[in-house]
Image (cartoon, grey):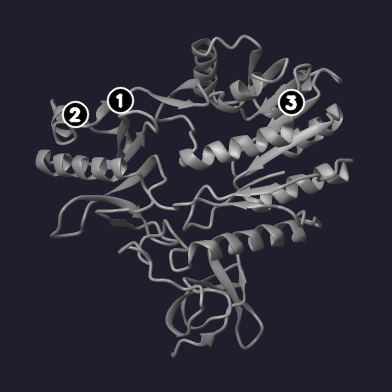
């Protein structure tokens, strides 16, 4: 059966572009751009939706460029490398506008899209899958293929900090030399302002032991790095934090500063304000807000993150932050009405539980700043807040993940 030629017209959350087949059904086409005429090679069908990938591009967009990465199209990590970077930002804005519109909201017309001057080599954390070849071939590290559980081994990745790439190759070399088996993944995090490299190798089902001297052999290949297996330092704005491989850290250090500054500018915490920091992690935002506020109450469910946050407050001699360990929706029930004037929240991709939104509405604070990495759940939660009496005053998009479909939004 010959693949149809389609003309997609709208970007979708997830990195595809939506086209319509002869019957009017939606087809999500990967690696195409709006307005192009492409051969749509079917790749699957799920829940009444068809998926395809662009084959022959008959009429290319003026915004199409040659991808920089040799693995683009096979590796599933990036979705937009075939689009010139300013156009990627436009596509992301359209995706967020669509998500807000579907939730009954209107993205403020003056919403900026804050991109990067150089959108390459920005990731300070890499998560690599162990790839054991079937039959002949060498072991490697790599990434999942697009919408697949299979992985592809890579030797380079231009969106990762060059130190991450070099370290991945060094670990691969030593794994091959030592014949280490049953590996699942390799995690690497580079200190943005130092030469430390935090690493962790995981075995499948936690069954495996590295041979004696393994780390020393890797270190010999990386003489300019300091290999760390417990924690590393993250520094910004004169604040110092300890970060572990198992705790969340923003992978784009440059844009993290843009994101945090954007959120703090919206929050406008004054010296008499008590502020809630919800889903507070290791305390990065809490300690930054505490510099201008009277006090901050940080709420986080992950015990390891709370422990690090308390340590980070001590490191920075910050005494006006208190920490509550527990689910946000439960911990908010202990907060008294009128005790806080503002809140900043940065939940995981799934967004807030309805009970958490309900507690925010009960507290009725004058200002909420909501940071999100998913435009759909962001719009859903904001719509509930608007129904409860809030109104959107400002919004901004921060491109934390160039060449991928991911985008951070703040409102």
Mark 3 residue crowding within 10 angstroms, few (<14) / some (14–19) / many (20+) = many
- Residue that mark 1 sits on: 229
Quadrant of the rendered image containing residue 55: bottom left
Q: CA distance from mark 2 to mark 1?
A: 9 Å
Asked if one can make out residue 352 in the rendered structure from this viewpoint, the answer is no
Report which quarter residue 206 is drawn in: top left
Hey, which residue is sitting farthest left in the picture? 177
Write the residue at 37% across / 43% down: 127
Quadrant location of the N terminus in the rendered image: bottom left
- The secondary structure type at the circle numbered 1 is loop
What residue did someone put label 3 on? 269
On screen, residue 143 above or below 214: below
Question: In the figure, is residue 312 to the left or right of 361?
Answer: left
Helix, strand or loop at label 3? It is loop
- Disc number placed over residue 183 in the picture, else none: none
The single residue placed furthest to the bottom in the displayed view is 2
Residue 353's spot in the image, x, y percent? 71, 38
Residue annotated with mark 2:
215
Dot placed on the residue nearer the N-terminal end, 1 or 3: 1
Q: Nearer the viewer, mark 3 or mark 2?
A: 3
Secondary structure under the numbered disc 2 in the rendered image: helix
Looking at the image, residue 110 sits to the left or right of residue 407; the answer is right
Q: Which quadrant: the C terminus? A: top right
Asked if the residue under mark 2 is in contact with the one under mark 3, i.e. CB atoms within 8 Å, the reply is no
Disc 2 or 1, which lies upstream in sequence? Answer: 2
Name the foreground residue: 44 vs 385.
385
Residue 79: image location, x then y, percent: 46, 62
Position of residue 161 relative to residue 226, above or below, is: below
Q: Report if the CB atoms under discs 2 and 1 are less than 8 Å apart.
A: yes
**Cα distance in 3D space between marks 1 and 3:** 37 Å
């Amino acid at each position: 059966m010959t693949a149809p030629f389609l003309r997609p017209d709208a970007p979708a959350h997830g990195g595809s572009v939506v086209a319509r087949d002869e019957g009017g059904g939606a087809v999500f086409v990967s690696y195409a751009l709006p307005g192009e005429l492409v051969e749509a090679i079917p790749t699957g069908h799920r829940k009444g939706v068809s998926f395809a990938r662009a084959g022959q591009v008959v009429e290319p967009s003026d915004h199409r460029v040659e991808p920089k990465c040799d693995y683009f199209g096979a590796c599933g990590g990036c979705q937009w490398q075939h689009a010139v970077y300013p156009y990627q930002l436009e596509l992301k804005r359209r995706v967020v506008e669509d998500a807000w519109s579907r939730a009954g909201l209107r993205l403020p017309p003056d919403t900026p899209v804050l991109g990067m001057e150089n959108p390459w080599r920005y990731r300070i954390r890499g998560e690599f899958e162990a790839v054991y070849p079937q039959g002949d071939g060498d072991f490697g590290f790599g990434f999942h293929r697009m919408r697949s559980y299979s992985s592809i081994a890579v030797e380079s990745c231009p969106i990762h900090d060059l130190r991450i790439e070099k370290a991945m190759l060094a670990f691969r070399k030593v794994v091959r030399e030592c014949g280490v088996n049953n590996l699942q993944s390799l995690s690497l995090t580079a200190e943005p302002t130092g030469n430390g490299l935090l690493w962790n190798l995981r075995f499948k089902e936690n069954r495996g032991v590295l041979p004696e001297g393994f780390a020393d052999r890797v270190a010999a290949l990386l003489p300019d790095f300091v290999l760390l297996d417990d924690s590393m330092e993250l520094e910004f704005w004169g604040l110092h934090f300890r970060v572990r491989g198992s705790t969340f850290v923003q992978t784009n250090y440059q844009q993290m500063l843009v994101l945090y500054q954007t959120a703090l500018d919206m929050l406008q915490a004054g010296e008499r304000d008590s502020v809630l920091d919800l889903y507070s992690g290791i305390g990065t935002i809490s300690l930054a807000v505490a510099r201008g506020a009277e006090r901050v109450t940080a709420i986080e469910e992950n015990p390891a993150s709370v422990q690090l946050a308390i340590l980070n407050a001590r490191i920075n001699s910050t005494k006006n932050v208190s920490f509550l360990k527990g689910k946000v929706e439960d911990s908010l029930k202990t907060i008294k009405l009128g005790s806080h004037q503002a809140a900043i929240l940065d939940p995981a991709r799934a967004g807030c539980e309805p009970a958490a939104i309900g507690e925010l509405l009960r507290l009725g604070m004058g200002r909420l700043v909501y940071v999100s990495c998913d435009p759909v759940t962001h719009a859903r939660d904001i719509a509930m807040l608007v129904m409860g009496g809030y109104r959107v005053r400002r919004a901004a998009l921060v491109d934390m993940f160039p060449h991928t479909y991911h985008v951070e939004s703040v409102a």
